[in-house]
Amino acid sequence: MRAYLRLMATLVVAAVAMPASWFQLLDTLKEQASYESYYRSQPPVACPWCGQPLTNGPPQAGALLYCPSDGWQYPRDWDEDSMAGM
Ligand SMILES: [Zn+2]
């Protein structure tokens, strides 16, 4: 019990000495926004419908990547909001 109280006292002193600021929260939000924009900009590696790895699309179809089993194509069928992992 005494060790617990000593630990709590140390944490309280540390929290008073280094209070969290709005700038830290702003930095966290900026970091989250950068992660989100990065993952939205990355092309998919697997089909979002069936999970099969995508292959390079045929040039006549104009698709960069496509799924050979169900015909899903990137970027034609790509939806960032539901398929980018966000
Ligand atoms: Zn597929």
Image (cartoon, rainbow, N blue to C red):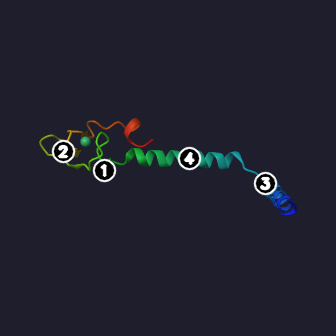
Of circles 4 and 1, the one toward us is 1
Residue at the (18%, 44%) spot, across then down: 68
Q: Which residue is mark 2?
A: 68
Query: 49 or 60: which is nearer to us?
Result: 49
Q: Which residue is mark 4?
A: 30
Q: Give the structural element (helix, strand or loop) at label 2.
A: loop
Q: CA distance from mark 4 to mark 2?
A: 38 Å
Q: CA distance from mark 4 to mark 1?
A: 26 Å
Whether 86 is drawn above or below 9: the answer is above
Q: CA distance from mark 1 to mark 3?
A: 44 Å
Q: Residues within 10 Å of mark 1 (few under 14, many from 20)?
A: some
Nearest to N terminus: mark 3 or mark 2: 3
Q: Amino acid at mark 1?
A: Val
Residue 60 percent location from the top left of the image: 11, 42
Quadrant containing the C terminus in the rendered view: top left
Occupied quadrant, residue 50 = top left
Residue at the (82%, 55%) spot, across then down: 12
Q: Is residue 22 toward the left or the right of residue 35 in the image?
A: right
Residue 6 percent location from the top left of the image: 85, 62
Q: CA distance from mark 3 to mark 2?
A: 56 Å
Q: CA distance from mark 2 to mark 1?
A: 13 Å
Q: Which residue is mark 1?
A: 45
Instruction: Report the image quarter containing ligand 1.
Output: top left
Q: Which residue is mark 3?
A: 15
Q: Give the structural element (helix, strand or loop) at label 4.
A: helix
Q: Residues within 10 Å of mark 2 (few under 14, many from 20)?
A: some
Mark 2 within 8 Å of ligand 1, using the beta carbon: yes
